[in-house]
Amino acid sequence: MTPATTVAPPAISGDPPSEPRADAVQAPRLVTSTEEIHSSIRKPGSVKINVQGAFIVDAESTTPQRTNSLGNGRGSPTHHETSDIRLPNHTGGVSHIAVDIGGSLIKLVYFSRELPSTDPGGRLNFQLFETDRIDDCIEFMKDLRDKHIELNGPRTDELVVMATGGGAYLFYDKIREALGIDVSREDEMQCLMIGLDFFITEIPREVFTYSETDPMHFVTPRETIYPYLLVNIGSGVSMLKITGPRSYERVGGTSLGGGTLWGLLSLLTDATSFDEMLELAGQGDNTNVDMLVGDIYGQDYGKIGLKNTAIASSFGKIYRKKLEANAVQTEGETGSEAKPNGTSQKKPGFNDSDISRSLLYAVSNNIGQIAYLQSQLHNLNDIYFGGTFIRGHRQTINTLSYAIKFWSKGSKQAYFLRHEGYLGAVGAFLRRQPKNWGRRGSLEGMDELQEWRAQRVAAEASTTV
Amino acid sequence: MTPATTVAPPAISGDPPSEPRADAVQAPRLVTSTEEIHSSIRKPGSVKINVQGAFIVDAESTTPQRTNSLGNGRGSPTHHETSDIRLPNHTGGVSHIAVDIGGSLIKLVYFSRELPSTDPGGRLNFQLFETDRIDDCIEFMKDLRDKHIELNGPRTDELVVMATGGGAYLFYDKIREALGIDVSREDEMQCLMIGLDFFITEIPREVFTYSETDPMHFVTPRETIYPYLLVNIGSGVSMLKITGPRSYERVGGTSLGGGTLWGLLSLLTDATSFDEMLELAGQGDNTNVDMLVGDIYGQDYGKIGLKNTAIASSFGKIYRKKLEANAVQTEGETGSEAKPNGTSQKKPGFNDSDISRSLLYAVSNNIGQIAYLQSQLHNLNDIYFGGTFIRGHRQTINTLSYAIKFWSKGSKQAYFLRHEGYLGAVGAFLRRQPKNWGRRGSLEGMDELQEWRAQRVAAEASTTV
C-alpha cells in the first residue's frame, strides 16, 4: 500500500522572471511591464511560467473573460466545472494556447493575466469543446489571438498553438489557416505524461485518493513519483507505464471507454449530455438490469469468494424480460404509449437511470480491472486515473477506486485529479518551455520530440502521395 | 507458441463393462443385456461409460428422441446445433441426467441407447433450454425418467439428476419435487474443469485452433495438458487456472459476457434470439459506429503501434451523430416513421447489424484481452475458450483468437471446442463415476466434494434461519 505522501511542496526550479515571494497569494498587485511581455513573446521558447504559490481557484470566482462557448442550444456536455489555476507569481506574457483534440472533446488551456487588474500573476484557464464543434473552438482561439494583439501589438507570428491529441493531425491545416499562426504538434502520450507530472509535483490540492469516509483526500505534491501507471480515459482508454521524466511505454488500453458510455446511453436513454447521463446513473439501481450472483445461485458462491451481490453479468437480466414483454405485447397489442419513469415499449420494465448506472459500473469496473492487471504485470503500485470520462463524478471514482482495491487486495493505490481531463492539454502547454523547466527534467526529451516530428513529416509525405 | 499436438489418442483407462474392441466403430451391433443395465443402476456410482471409439455424430444424423423443446413460438435462442457424441462401446444403462443451470441457459446432457436399434452403444445427447423456461426442462427430464422406467421398471430411486451451475441451488427443491428423484449438486468450477479435461483428452475432432486459412484445425486428444487457462463465457465470464486434475483456482472473470451482448442487443435491435444477433453481426460494419484511430488522427498513430484501423472507442461515433440527428429532428419535427435497414428515429444512421457487430467485437476483444493478461500473470500458454456465448460463431472465434495472438505476440494459443457450451454439464455427468475413471485422475477430488457439500449445507442452514 502506497500511503498518501505528506512531503512539503518542493521549491520551484527554473528561472522565475521576478523574485519568488513567500506571501504571493496576499501580495499587493504590481504592474507587469510591456517590456517583460514583449521580451518573452519575442523569444519563443523563453516563456517561463512561475508556478510558485500556484493554487486552484474556487469555482465561484470565475475568470472574467471566460465565455460559455457551449451555450449554443445543443445541450452542453460539459457542465462539470474545472476550476482555474491561479499563478500569482507569474508575470510573463501569453504567447501560446494549448489544445488537446480528442475523438469526442477538445480540451483547451491558456494563460491569462487578470485585466483590468494590475496583479502580476494570472491564471491557467481550462475550456472544453465538443470535437465536432471545432469551429467554435477556432473562434474562441481567434478571440484569444485578437486579445493578444490588442495587448501586445500585431506580433502574431510569435503566438503559437500547441496542439496534441489526434485532432492535432486531423485539423492541423484547418487551424493553421483559420488563425494564421504556427501550430506545433505534440505527441499525445508525452503530453499526458508531462501534464500529469506537473499536476502531481506542482499543484496543491490537485491529486487525491478516494475512500467512502474521505472521498477527496488530497495528496501533497511530491517529488518521488516513479514508476506509476497512468490510465487516461477519454473516448477510448490508454494505459501508460511511466518510469521516469522521459520514459514511458503504452502498455495497453481498451476501446471500452467514455465513447462507449456516451454512445450507448445516447441510444438507450433520453439523456443528451454527459452530465445528464451521470445524473441518471446517480439515481439508478443497476440490480434491476444486472444479473447478480444471487440471481443465479440464490445465495453466495462462497467457495470462489463471490458474494450474492456481485455482478455476474452486466445487463444480464434484460434479455429474458424483453422477450417476456414482447410476448405480452404480441398477445395484447397494447399500442405504443410511453410509460412513466423513462421506461418505454423499447425498454419494458427498465428505466433510463438503471441502465445508466449499470453501464457506468460496467465500463468503470472493466477499466479498473484491466488497470489492475497491467499494474500487476508491470509491477506498479500507483495508478493515476485521468481523462474526460471521470468528470469528478463520485460513483465513477468510487468504482475505479474500489476495483483497484478489490483486485489488488489493497496493495495498490488509485489516484484521481481535479483537472483530470486536462493532462494532455497542460502537457502540450508546458512543452513550450525552456529546457529543464517545470517538472524537473520532464522536458529534457527534446531530441525525442524532434525525432517524432521528423517521423511525422516523413509519414505525412508518404501518405499524401 | 504452443503447437497443436499430434499425439495419438490415449488408451482408455478405468474398467469398461465389456472388452475394449479396436474395431468398435464398424462393429456389428450387439444386444445389451437387461442384466447389465440393472446391474449398473442398482449400484449408484458404479456406472461406467466406455468412451473408446467415441466420436461426434454428424448434425444430419439426429438422435431420434430429440425434441425441440424451444418450439414454443417465442423464438429459439438455440439454433446453434450441437452434435451428439456417439459412444459405440458403451453398454451400461442410463441412470443419470446432468444439467448445468446458468443465469440464461440450461445445458442438459444425457446418455441414450439407440432404440429400437440393438447396438450396444449409445449417445451423449446435448440439449439447451432457456433458464426462465425451467418448467420445459423439467418436463423434458420427466419424459426421460418415464422412458427410463419403461425400459428398466420402476426403479426410479436409482435415477439421479446431476446438477451444477447456480440453478442447481436456486431450483434444487423444485426439480427434486417435480421429478421425485435424487438431485446431486456439483460445484460449477469443478464441473467445468472435468468436462474440459474429458473433451481434451477423450474426444477426437472436438478441440480446435482457429486461423484465417484453417478456421477449424483439430487438435488430437492428448494427455499432457496442464497447466492451462479456462475461460468460460456464459452470461458472465469466469477464468480458471488449472494446474492438474484436482487443482483449479478462479483467478478472475468479468461481468461483460454473453448476458451483456444478449441484453443490450435485445434493447438496441429487433433481434429476438441469440442466433439472430450473431447473424446481424455477420452482416454489419462496425466502423459505422466505432471510432477508429484513423477517425481521430486521420492516420496511424505509429509511434505507439496503433494502426488507423484499430478501434479506439467502441460505439464512439454514436454520441455525435445522435445529437446531430436530434437537432435535425427538433428543427424539422419529421414524425416518427421507421427507416429502412433497421435504422429508426432512436438509432439515426445506425443499423442493427452495425451495432451488433460492434458489440460482438467489444465484448469478445475485451474478454480476449483480460484472458491474455490473466494468462500472462499466471504464466499459462494454453487458453481454452468455452461457454454458450461462442456458439461456434466464426467472428466470435476469430476475435477471441486474434486478441490472444495480438496481445501475446503469438506466444499463446487459443483453443475452442465444438461442445463449448457443455463443459459444465458434461463435467457434472462425469462426476457420477467410479473413482479414477474418465480423465485419468479428474475425479479423485471426492474428499473436496464432500467438504464443499458440507459447507453448502452449513451455509444453507445459516441463511434459512
Image (tube, coloured by chain):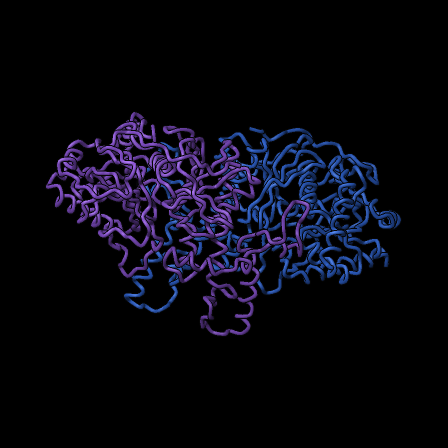
Chain colours: A blue, B purple
Q: Position of residue B168 (x, y in %)?
A: 28, 40
- In the image, residue B11 sits, relative to residue B86, either above or below, namely above
- In the image, residue B317 sits, relative to residue B463, either above or below, namely below
- Count the labels in the image: 0
Q: Is residue B329 visible?
A: yes
Q: Position of residue B357 (x, y in %)?
A: 48, 56
Q: Is residue A282 visible?
A: no
Q: Position of residue A127 (x, y in %)?
A: 67, 53
Quadrant into which the N terminus of chain A falls: top right
- In the image, residue A148 sits, relative to residue B94, either above or below, namely below
Quadrant into which the C terminus of chain A falls: bottom right
Image-quadrant location for residue B179:
top left
Left or right, residue A85 beside residue A80: right
> For the point 68% across and 58% down, which residue is it?
A67
Instruction: Decide which of B101, B276 is in the foreground and name it.
Output: B276
> For the point 66% across and 57% down, which residue is it?
B298
